[in-house]
Image (cartoon, rainbow, N blue to C red):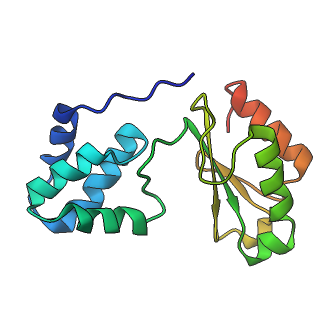
Amino acid sequence: MVEFLEVSIESIDQIIHSYECSQRYALAIMQDMQRTYQYVPREGMEALAQYLDCPVSALYAMATFYKALSLVPKGEHIIKCCDGTACHIRGASTLIDGVKRELGIEPGETTEDGFFSFETVNCLGSCALAPVLVVDDVYYGKVTLEKLKEIIADVRKGGAA
């Protein structure tokens, strides 16, 4: 089971105070929280709202607008399946079903052991490689169900994603 870093006010304050007190840095600060904790913790948004003297709702709106930010912990390995037009036409729905079967989770969920999170995205900008899968920022093109099983097995074994 993957253990997530415990959220601490000291760590959050360190992230926040490494930036000038200006709302223009709110996104960058939340991105740093995301890198540290694998998500943007509620405590982090509350502390940031206090630091910037802005409502938590404004930060929440920003955090929910950007798909790169998450309000729930992500798994150690993040699988993204493109379901844009080119990928969809070339079988993305089959890959999505394959990931759901292999991991037992739906898009937007994380496995119980915290090892994998699964997301679908609208476009990865790699249409010529459709269907495309990204695992931990490594792109895989022309993915088949067989290749999908190999990718997941390699990640489980600790190989390159």
Residue 20 appears in view:
no
Vertical arrangement, residue 90 with respect to residue 158, above or below = below
Q: Position of residue 48 (x, y in %)?
A: 18, 53
Vertical arrangement, residue 91 with respect to residue 134, above or below = below
Q: Position of residue 88 (x, y in %)?
A: 80, 71
Q: Quadrant of the C terminus?
A: top right
- Quarter residue 37 falls in: top left
Relative horizontal placement of residue 141, taking residue 107 as reference (left or right): right
How many discs mark residues in the rendered view? Answer: 0
Residue 43 appears in view:
yes
Residue ID at (84%, 59%): 142
- Quarter residue 55 falls in: bottom left
Q: Quadrant of the N terminus?
A: top right
Seen from the viewer's position, the closer of residues 149 and 128 is 149
Relative horizontal placement of residue 101, taking residue 159 as reference (left or right): right
Residue ID at (35%, 48%): 40
- Quarter residue 75 falls in: top right
Residue ID at (75%, 31%): 154
Relative horizontal placement of residue 104, taking residue 136 as reference (left or right): right
Residue ID at (16%, 39%): 14
Q: Position of residue 148 (x, y in %)?
A: 82, 45
Relative horizontal placement of residue 48, taking residue 73 as reference (left or right): left
Vertical arrangement, residue 145 with respect to residue 121, above or below = above
Q: Position of residue 151 (x, y in %)?
A: 78, 40
